[in-house]
Image (cartoon, rainbow, N blue to C red):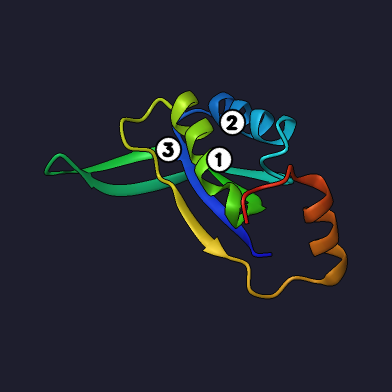
Amino acid sequence: MSFIQVITTTDRKELAQAIAGRLVEEGLAACVQITGAIESVYKWQGKVERAEEYLCLIKTRASLFGRVASVIRGLHSYETPELIAVELTAISDEYRQWLDESLVAGEE
């Protein structure tokens, strides 16, 4: 069973909190850490943009990525929200057990 950290950003702290709450309540995330405000510099529609954003670090099972992404897309204000997953390759046994117990079953 593999676990991932999904990364997304939002333009408002309240939106980050709403996404985090929904994911944890539905068992799609064991934990969501929200950091910010951070400054993001990116290119959008041919122009360099700067924005203050909030970073969400979402701990979940790899098999739940599609459902996590669907919730984020449904709540998000961005046309193209950041949806990046990084595999967690080293996890303590205790934390791995807590992750597994905190999440709904996914398709393996």
Q: Please say whether residue 54 is visible from this viewpoint.
A: no
Mark 3 and mark 1 in contact (Cβ < 8 Å)? no
- Depth order, front residue of 51/29: 29
Q: Decide which of tag 3 and tag 2 comes sooner along the chain.
A: 2
Packing grade of label 3 (10 A; few <14, some 14-19, many >=20) is: some
Disc 2 versus disc 1: nearer the observer:
1
Relative to 84, say whether 11 is above or below. Answer: above
Between the C-alphas of marks 1 and 3, the distance is 23 Å
Provide residue 75's location: percent of width, then percent of height. 49, 24
Provide residue 57's location: percent of width, then percent of height. 60, 49
Helix or strand or loop: what does disc 1 sit on?
Answer: helix
Mark 2 and mark 3 in contact (Cβ < 8 Å)? no
Answer left or right for 73 relative to 28: left
Provide residue 5's location: percent of width, then percent of height. 59, 56
From this viewpoint, which residue is outermost toward the right?
94
Q: Decide which of tag 1 and tag 3 comes sooner along the chain.
A: 3
Check residue 19 in the rendering and tell me which mark sits there, or answer none: 2
Q: Which residue is depicted at the point 62% across and 50% down?
A: 107
- Depth order, front residue of 99/12: 99
Helix or strand or loop: what does disc 3 sit on?
Answer: strand
Q: Which residue is depicted at the point 79% across and 63% down?
A: 96
Disc 1 versus disc 3: nearer the observer:
1
Check residue 28 in the rendering and tell me which mark sits there, or answer none: none
Packing grade of label 1 (10 A; few <14, some 14-19, many >=20) is: many
Residue under numbered circle 3: 52
- The three-letter code of the residue at mark 1 reads Val
Check residue 68 in the rendering and tell me which mark sits there, or answer none: 1
- The three-letter code of the residue at mark 3 reads Glu
Between the C-alphas of marks 3 and 2, the distance is 18 Å
